[in-house]
């Protein structure tokens, strides 16, 4: 029998532990106001790093959201950076209250993982998309379609976590990484994808269907 999984990302343990330790110190010293503030901070950090289970759609051609958040952009682009093709670009912005654990949008094999350090622009801005720290993963499906998903750090976030490596065989809806404290994920899809998402829509990683590979 499998043991129950702790619904908190392990990358958050050092932050949670440090904040809880500081809270205890303030409490032992009798600093009630500082104790309250530190406790609130600890609860927020714990909430930020939550990692709930998700129900993955059964349709094999469904593309699921790689991140929780709000769709801020859908456009037709000439993607020369990742897929080297015309593509639909979908941008999902995660604020500090969203779950920040990211999930694989579809089954496939990882071809490349590209990390680039960057600047401190807001993740929902054009400058952020172009100049911030990012980690891009290029994936090829069983039918030969190329899909890219790009984790982009935000104004505060400066630590992208990606557990994928080239030649990994991945499954739709599985966790592949996270970004700390506010961020964005861009997704580049083949032009013949049947899109099922709109700008302004709120999506849930691993559950919300962005479209279907036709």
Image (tube, rainbow, N blue to C red):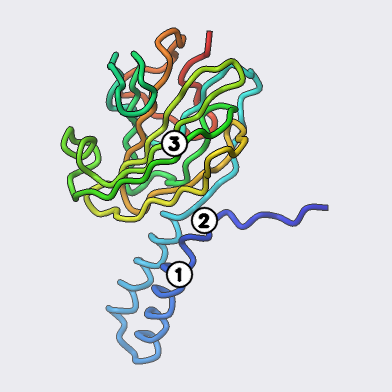
Asked if marks 1 and 2 touch (Cβ < 8 Å), the reply is: no
Residue 136: % across, % down: 39, 38
Lower sequence index among marks 2 and 3 = 2
Q: Residue at x 19, y 49 (%)?
A: 119
Q: CA distance from mark 1 to mark 2?
A: 11 Å
- Dot 1 or dot 3: first in sequence order is 1
Is residue 86 found left or right of 13 in the rendered image? left
Is 25 positioned to the left or the right of 4 in the image? left
Circle nearer the N terminus (1, 2) = 2
Q: Position of residue 165 (x, y in %)?
A: 53, 44
Quadrant of the rendered image containing residue 152:
top left
Q: Residues within 10 Å of mark 2 (few under 14, many from 20)?
A: some
Q: Residue at x 28, y 23 (%)?
A: 73
Looking at the image, residue 131 lies above or below residue 50: above
Mark 3 — residue? 137
- From the viewer's perspective, is residue 174 above or below residue 41? above
Where, by quadrant of the figure, is residue 187 drawn? top left
Which SS class for mark 3? Answer: strand
Q: Mark 2 = which residue?
A: 9
Q: Disc 2 to disc 3, how far (Cα)? A: 21 Å
- SS of the residue at dot 1? helix
Residue 117 image offset from top left, x and y in percent: 27, 50
- State the residue in front, 36 or 205: 205
- The residue under the point 51% across, 49% down is 163
């Amino acid at each position: 029998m499998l043991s129950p999984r702790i619904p908190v990302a392990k990358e958050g343990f050092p932050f949670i532990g440090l904040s809880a330790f500081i809270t205890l110190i303030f409490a032992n010293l009798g600093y009630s106001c500082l104790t309250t503030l530190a406790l609130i901070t600890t609860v927020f950090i714990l909430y930020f790093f939550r990692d709930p289970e998700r129900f993955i759609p059964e349709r094999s051609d469904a593309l699921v959201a790689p991140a929780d958040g709000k769709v801020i952009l859908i456009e037709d682009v000439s993607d020369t950076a990742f897929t080297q093709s015309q593509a639909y670009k979908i941008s999902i912005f995660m604020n500090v209250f969203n779950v920040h654990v990211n999930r694989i949008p579809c089954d496939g094999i990882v071809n490349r993982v590209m990390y680039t350090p960057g600047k401190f622009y807001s993740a929902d801005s054009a400058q952020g998309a172009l100049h911030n720290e990012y980690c891009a993963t290029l994936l090829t499906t069983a039918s030969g379609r190329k899909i890219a998903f790009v984790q982009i750090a935000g104004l505060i976030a400066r630590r992208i976590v990606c557990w994928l490596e080239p030649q990994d065989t991945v499954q739709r809806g599985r966790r592949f990484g996270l970004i700390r404290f506010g961020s964005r994920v861009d997704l580049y899809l083949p032009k013949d994808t049947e899109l099922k998402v709109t700008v302004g829509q709120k999506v849930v990683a691993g559950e919300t269907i962005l479209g279907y590979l036709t």
